[in-house]
Every structure is written in C-alpha cells, then in structure tokens.
Image: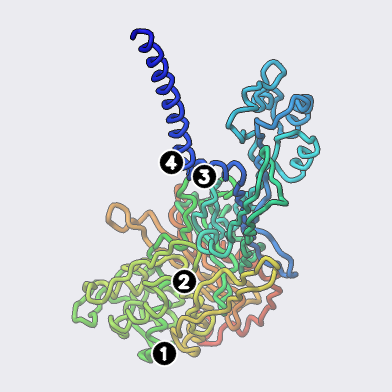
Amino acid sequence: MAKSFAPRIRFWTLALCMLFGYGAIGYRLVKLHVVDAPRLTKELQNSRYRVIPLNSRRGDIFTYDLNGGKELFATSQTLLEVGIDPTLLQEKDLGKLSKLSLLLGKELWDVEKGFGVVENRLPESQKSGRERWRLLARRIDEATYQKIVDLEISGLYGTRKYERVYPKKSLASHVVGLVRRDGESVFGIEKEFDFYLSGQRGWRESEVTAGQEMAQFRRRYVPARDGMSLALSIDSYVQHQIEAELYLIAQEYQPESACIIVSDPYSGFLLGLANYPTFDPNHYTKFDQSNHKNRAMTDPIEPGSTFKIVAASAALEENVVDIQSEFDCSLPTLRMPNGYVAKLPKDWKTFGVLSVEGIVTYSSNRGAAHLGTLVGSEKFYEYVRRFGFGEKTGLDIGIESRGILHPVRNWDGLTLSRMTMGHAISATPLQIHYAMASVANGGLLMRSQVVSRILDTENKEAVTYGPMVKRRVISSETAKTLSQLLVKTASPGGTAHGAFISGYRVAGKTGTAQKIVDGRYSSHHHVGSFSGFFPADDPSVVITVIVDGSRTDMPVSGSGTAVPSFRRISEKLIPYYAISPREESSAFALSGRPTSVETSN
C-alpha cells in the first residue's frame, strides 16, 4: 500500500505542476492578447511610426520705401535644435567630436558629456536604453548645420524651428509689438494680426527603423502653411526722425512719458508713431515692462488748449458766431446755459475784448468758455463726440483707451467752462491727433490705420485696406475757416509762432495742461503739446507732439517744448516729401496779421 501511494503522489505533483505551468502560460497569453493588447499595439505603432511636427514660418512685417523697396520690421530666422539619438551612436564617430564642438561653439568636454563618453568610449548601456533624444544645442543657423551634417555622425540630427527677429531694433517697436521666445505674441501688430501672421503648423507620419525615418513608407503628410506678410503704412524715415526727436526730448526734459504721431490727414494711415520710454523687442526682457506700453493709445491726458478747436468749430458750424464776433475776455464770471454763474478760469495773459479769431490765435480760456456757452452743453457734448473723443480711434495694434468723457447729466456748473479749454476731459494722444486731422482734411474723422496690405506666401496681395471715413465732423467751409485761424496761431504773433516755417502755411494749436498731483491741479507739473499740419491749404502731414511732465527743472509747455520739436520734424519732412513752398502773402486770408504777443499755452 505504501508502494502504490508514492507513485500517486508523484503523479499528482507532476500534474499540478503541469497544470500550473499551462495556466500561467494561458494567463500570460490572455493578458498579452486580450488585456494588454491595445496598449502593446499602440506602443508597437509608436515605435514603428513617428508623428513629426512641421513648424510654419511666421510672416514678415515690413513697409515700402519711396522707391517701392521693402524694409523689414519683423521677420523669422530659421534655426535648428541639434541633438543625438544615444542608441545610434558609434565608436568610430568619437574622433569627429572636436570638429563638432567648434561648430557648436562649445568646449570639447561639454560635447563629450552630451554624447555620454566615459573614458573615451561609449557605454553599451546607453545603446540599449530607451532615451532617443538628447539636446546638444538650441540655436544653430542653416549654414552651420549643413557643416555639422557633413561630418556624418551617426544618430545626430536637427529639428528646424523659426525665431522672431526685429532687424530695426527699437524702431516702431510699439507699433510692431513682439513675439516672446515661447512663440506667444503679446501685443502690437504681432498679436492683433496673429491669425494672418502665424500660418498653420503641419505634420507627417512615417515609419522609422533604428530611429531613422523611412520616407518611402510615409503614411500621412500635412504640409505646414506659412503665415502671410503685412505691409505697414509706417514710413521708416519718418519713424526714425520722430524717434530721434523723442531722444532729444528725453535728454533735455527727462519726461515721465512723451509721444509723437505723424499721419496722412486724408487717408488716416499712420506714417509714424513713437513713444518714450521705448524698448528693443529683440531683448525685451532687459527693459521694464512699462516700456512696452503704447502710451499714445493707453494713457489719457487732459488735452489742454489743443481742445479749443472743438469749441471754435462748434460755434462756427452752428452759426452762432463768425470770426469777427467779439467777446469781453476780461469778465471773471459768466452765466452758463443752466443759469449757474460760473467763475471763469484765468487766462495766461490779461485780455480785453477779443474776436473769435483772437480767441483762437491767443488761446484765451475765457474766450473759449464764451463760445461754449453760446453753443450750449448738449450741443457742445455732441461736437466733442463727433471729433472722436470718448471713443476708440480703431487702431488695431493693441489695447486702446476711450478716454474719459462724462455725459452731460453728470456735469456740474463749472464743467462746460472748463471743458472748452481742455480740462474736465481726458483723451489719448491718438484721439487728439485725429481730431486735428479732421480739421486738416476738410472736416472728416478718419479711422486710424497702420496695416495697408496683407500679402500671401507668393507675395501677392490678399487684402488691401483703404481710407475709412467714420463720419463728417464739421463742414468743409468751417474746417477751412478754422484752418485759417490756426495758421495765424502758428504764425508770428500767435501763441505757436515757433512753428512758423518761412514759405509754408503751418496750422496748429498748442496746449499746456496742468497735471493733477495729490488730487489738485499743480502749478509746477504740466503736459505740453502741439498738434498741427502743413501746408494748411493742402496738408501733406499732421504732426502731434506731447510731452508729459519733466524730472528736471526745465519747464514744460506747448510753445516751449512741443512746438520746437514739431518744427524740427517738419523741416526734415519738407525735402523728403518734396513739399513745395507757398507765397507767404497768402498765409493771412482773414483779417491780417495779429499784433505780437508773448507766447504761452
């Protein structure tokens, strides 16, 4: 009985072992072919096929010069990331590392470290490892990369990418904007027109073996679509001149900020727009982030006396006055349309009786209040809105402020008498500029624009932008009359006599606004401005100069600070645009030259 028991034990032990073994094999087969099949199939596909992204080239931003040539403000430079596949490296290539280090601009030991060299040999462990990409260098140009390829090092390859560069450095940087190193466009044209500039990324799916693509077994291919290019209305010569002028202003006054704007009055297209402080988009991280602000669009200021064109044009357009209508500007008070007797603001010089022509020429605060009173609060507010204050200009290059314009129901008894002289309202430099441009072009408020064309990848025009009229502000007759008044303002005897250029009819208006410090108007801190155009009878350009404060002891005013800059810019644009002189005798078509007065405002 004991003898028969032993064979049975061996039999069942063997049977159980076989059953367990076959069960384990069965379990493993089920796990591999059923449970893990989707994952393993995906891993197999991933190891056999690779999806390779294809970057698109961002379109250029440029402008045309007077001869039709292109001047680049922003373009994309082709660069390559160079790396290795450690599993494909071979011992025979180690002798080439010294040449590779020179091409990469690195020390030999650093390159050897990247290759994983240990005691002048390649470890066998890394050849069988799972790491398939090890970065050696990020920014290698095409010519250098071709020399690297010629070394024929196994497992070494590059990935092409594009990096944004700005050939003109800080020139027009607030207009162009920037693209960060991570590829994100953050402001300016780069951001607002990103849809057109960025293009579309592509990809291809190919079979790979030993880490190398087999193009003959490529399964899918979606080519990248390069971005479109943008042509700007900015004139690089004009832009250079206004930025050079801002540099002089910064050196002399050290203002908190300053800006200069130049445009074509009839089309509304910008020829130049510059801000101080500025920055270089190639090295944007080296500048304070506040330097990136396009202050011409984002920072409202009280316009000061440049705003008196609204009061004068409203009174002339409503036919409540003519240029010879006279007002006693010595009166300290005036009854407002609502019956309130307002104390009038002081003038920079004591005046007696002034005509409308004299009010504009000598920039009388009290005279402007008289004109506003005749027009009335509701009607005056309507003209303020007509000139574009309280709304965006439409310039698509970033965040734009509407300024501050309260409705009439929120006005107090003093508002009308103060707003007519440019207080009790805030406006951006761009709004002030286009208000003056509407006088220059005969009474039309134009939409502000800077992109003139969009070109496809074959350099053919896909979109063309033309002048866009927002509305008529005043009649052409009123605009012509006001232009004549502004000519006298910018002539000998006027408050802006420094803008006078012999042989040319310059029209414009100064402004010197007190800044609010600690909740009160300061008598020591001012914003000086001048906005004007020439030739007055057929303007070629409108120029606005605004200087906000000073960190030196130099006083800031419209006539003393902004007007000289306007004249220097104008004198450089006259030969550039071949602007013909006019007979000086035709510069005073109204009632003759005014008597000489001191300048202010």
Identify the disc placed on residue 322: 1
Q: Nearer the viewer, mark 4 or mark 1?
A: 4
Q: Residue 287's mark? A: 3
Determine which quarter of the picture holds residue 455: bottom right
Foreground tag (3 vs 4): 4
Report which quarter residue 95 is drawn in: top right
Instruction: Give the distance between the C-alpha atoms of the residues marked 2 and 4, in whole angstroms.
Output: 61 Å
Outermost residue to the left: 339
Identity, as a three-letter code, of the amino acid under mark 4: Val
Residue type marked 1: Asp
Q: Position of residue 100 (x, y in %)?
A: 75, 31
Question: Closer to us: mark 2 or mark 4?
Answer: 4
Pointer 4 residue: 35
Residue type for callout 2: Gly
For this view, does 365 lie left or right of residue 168?
A: left
Task: Please tell me which of labels 1 and 2 falls first in the chain.
Answer: 1
Where the N terminus falls, by quadrant? top left
Q: Residues within 10 Å of mark 4 (few under 14, many from 20)?
A: few
Q: Residue under circle 2? A: 394
Q: Is residue 229 left or right of residue 285?
A: right
537, 127: nearer the viewer: 127
